Amino acid sequence: MKRSFLLIFLITLIGVIYISRLFHLQIMKGSENSLTHSATIKVEYDYPERGYIYDRNGKLLVANQLSYDVMIVPKEVEPLDTLEFCSLLKIDKEDFKKRFTKAENYARWLPSVFLKQLAKEDYAYLQEKLPKYKGFYIQKRIIRNYPVKSAANVLGYISEVSEYKAKQSDYYEQGELIGAWGVEKQYEKELRGVKGKRYYKRNNLNEITGSFKDGIYDTLAVPGKDLILTIDSELQQYGELLMSGKRGGIVALEPQTGEILALVTAPSYDPNLLVGRNRSPNSVKLFNDTIGMPTFDRGLQASYAPGSPFKILTGLIGLQEGVIDENSGFFCNHGYRYGRRPNEFMGCHCRIVGRPVRLKTAIAKSCNTYFANTYRKIVDKYENATIGTDAWSEHAKSFGLGNYLGYDLPSGQKGRIPDGKFYDRGYNFRWGATTTISNSIGQGEVETTPIQLANMTAAIANKGYYYTPHIVKKIAGNTSLDSAYTTRRKTTVAPQHFPIAIEAMHESFTKGTARRSRVEGIEMCGKTGTVENFIRVNRKKVQLVDHSIFVAFAPKDNPKIAIAIFVENGGYGSTIAAPITSLLIEKYLNGEVTRKHVEDRMINLSLQERYDNQLLIQNTDTIATRTK
Amino acid sequence: MRQERNNIFAGIDWLLVLLYIILVGFGWMNIYASSSTEESREIFDFSTKYGKQLIFIGLSIPVIIFILFFNSKFYEQFASVLYIISLVLLAGVLVFGKKINGATSWYNFGGIGLQPSEFAKAFTALALAKLMSDRQYNLKLLKNQAKTFIVIFLPAFFIALQPDMGSVLIYFAFFFVLNREGLTLSYILFGATTIILFILTISFGSKWVLSSCLFIITLATLYGIYKDKRFFRFNALKILSSYVFTTLFILGISYTYNNVLEQHQKDRFDILLGKVEDNKGIGYNSFQSEKTISSGGLSGKGFLQGDRTQGNFVPEQHTDYIYSTVGEEWGFIGSTLVIILFMILLYRIIYLSEIQTNKFARIYGYSVASIFFFHVAVNIGMVIGLFPTVGIPLPFFSYGGSSLWGFTLLLFIFIRLDAHKKYDW
């Protein structure tokens, strides 16, 4: 036996190896074999209708429509009267040949689209005639339809699922449709429903040999759910109308619930452009417009310096930290000097000289000096600037700034509320409150998106809390919203500090910067903002026209709407942003606008010329760099 | 002696016969599953593959009786004659044979094909046993070694001309026999090293393998010198030659691989070693058979319920890839059972060989075990994706008359020799 040890050993070894391999293949990898990926089973899908989308008042925003494609299987086509057939489809003979060859090149035995999206009247007529022509048939498809030409950025669009996504997912197959943007993307699962499946057996030649196990695995389609949005379509359309010819974003919230009443971005586009026959040329036009950027949602994605509205926050933090009170006063001498060098001076336009400025006035008149002092006191209250800035940063962040808000739309920006660490890195620990003094007035390193600003305004209106903004009011069939949208989020500033700030915001409409935009009968509270912005041209800093900003809420005591608006290069906050906001509030609260002259002026005001000029300035830079 | 004449079944090992019946029977069930269609399940339809296999199985009964009919001395005496006949048949097939799938390995008698290489294995084993059981024979002598190699590799040479590399490979199984009879392990070690170096060279390229081999040799030498200062002086020639041969060998492999091997042979190695992934072309078979086996799960999909088998996904499933049917329809339990049955068969043959008093029977039995082992290991290894695609059948399972009869011949001659052991003294 000793001599036969080698063979016996090898037999045992190979036996063990093979059995472990079988264990690996059959037991461990065996579970990977699902029905849909089995080569022996063919799955046919039954696609349910996609859910409809309504606005908060039940107005239909997104529906479905039928579309009819003429399909061709080249192999089955028999000789036909081309002339008659062409006149039937309203194409010429050349076109017919081209389409036929294309289909043939794709695959002779597989169906491909011969003519896309027939008109409805053509379909009825063709349906009778087409059976005469072998190899052609009509396929019904469901596509989206937008009865209201607005809110493209909110609604989003659907498109074919990407190859990568189809591979990753266990639901989508290549060629299927998927929500690609906006609500369509965010609520894809609810809207699409679940497709029904039918399994068939097939052999290695792909021929179907019968139903698989008598259909015990087959499932029925579950129709998609309808969505009711928080959007007020009237307000949304009005906002879009007012923004015509301008660039920027408007976000309107209902402070008591966090519902998004309007989410306007300008320029925008007609959602019907991304549906139907001209989808691809249109989408090329839209997505390649890198100047106007109509597919860029400025309300969610544009991160700007918030400017003066941020002063309210500085004031509130000052109150909370106890470094100021209602009666604290600072002298403003056309600005604030924070260093000895001539450029270490922050100008101010409040024009109050010779008497101390107090908090209410400071907000209403937008006094830079007051808030620079407050900011410095906040930061210097702590042992060093890092800790002080951290404390300030925590307060600001509790208003929903500096990070994703968590709303139910798929795009967004974090914005920026710097903390101590941020400056430690940037300035290598040699910095103090004065280094970052611009933060006090919402310039410097602070950045927010319009929706964050609107949310901040809502938090002020609510006196210290907010609900996470959201776009969906109700999903048909679901009883309640996600708890994330019904949880009250408190700010770190205590409620008793808010009334003074709200009074001050009210005053800005009565005596302050927004007094020309006041509306009789509505108690509005607001704050203007004017943000400087620069670009580099030929390595020199060039100042462009300021961004116009406004935040407001109304009515003062029982806030129903909070708005933030941003108009790129609109100049002073009081010249464009404030009137538009007041019009929107008037429209929303009263249902109609009485100040027709203001409305007309705003609608007809176009900044296109200004944008074109700026583009020229930017281009000289590019050209200059290139010629170097 | 009279007793034996009266009953040809006297003394035969019933365990081997039982294993044979189980394997052949189960094999046929799987051929039935893989070659029948839902429309035609008629068992006695002789136009189908499974119908023909039923005939082959039926015909193996007279073959068995015929084998058992002869006295075991007959095989010992006529071993050389049988061997020469098989050589003639192998040479003849090159001239008169029919070319199927690029290989001339079939005699065609009015529609019935016979593959001489399937029978040659048994006769080579007989000849080898005859040669080595001679009293004068001593494997330590180079002359005898040369004779032995000629006996083994002459038929392999003819088969290589067909060409049927899979069957040639089987002849290397005889090294186990030689080892059993006293040939030093160095031949097998040398062979194993060759194969390992071959695979490493193809996988990682000659540069890396060569430098690491030389590094290892250098380390070993340095260790030797460290142990004993005179090591180098005594072994200088050996050390130098190991450097030279390793270098030549590895360069030789990469030259052979790149310039001598045909593309389809290279492809097989490349796929197995994972150098290229190709599930549609040349790798289709392996990919499909692995998938098919894996889809069986623990207990399989049940007889005739394997959808991949029924859908004909694995090409050549009834012949070389029959084991994938077992995997799909009988699952981990069934396929493990088959492996265990083969293991029992092999252990039993080895055990019976070892207790033979007759050297001829022992050597023959050991050859049978080695040949079965090679067939089973290579075939199943290929089907479960552990071995490159080599076209050799799974004993008793694969479709085909020649291979079934060839294995029957191999096994039952041994049963005959074994049955005789008690009458030998």
Image: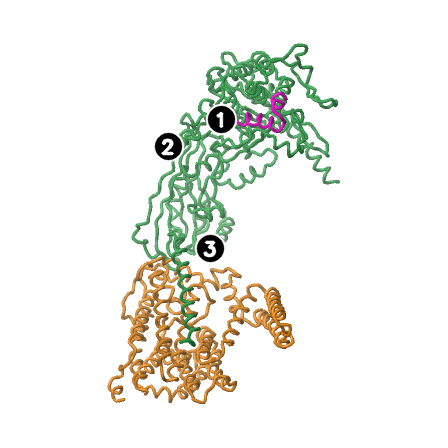
- Separation of disc 2 and disc 1 at Cα? 21 Å
The disc, 3 or 2, on the residue closer to the chain's N-terminal end is: 3
Element class at badge 1 = strand
- The amino acid sitting under disc 1 is Ala
Q: Nearer the viewer, mark 1 or mark 3?
A: 1
Query: Magenta residues?
Result: A376-399
Which one is nearer the viewer's eye here, A319 or A344?
Answer: A319
Labels 2, 1: one chain: yes
Q: Nearer the viewer, mark 3 or mark 2?
A: 2
Q: Which residue is mark 3?
A: A107
Residue A260 in view of the camera: yes
| Image location of residue A288, percent across then percent down | 58, 39
Q: Which chain, by letter, is green?
A: A
- The amino acid sitting under disc 2 is Ala
Element class at badge 3 = loop
| Image location of residue B114, percent across then percent down | 38, 79
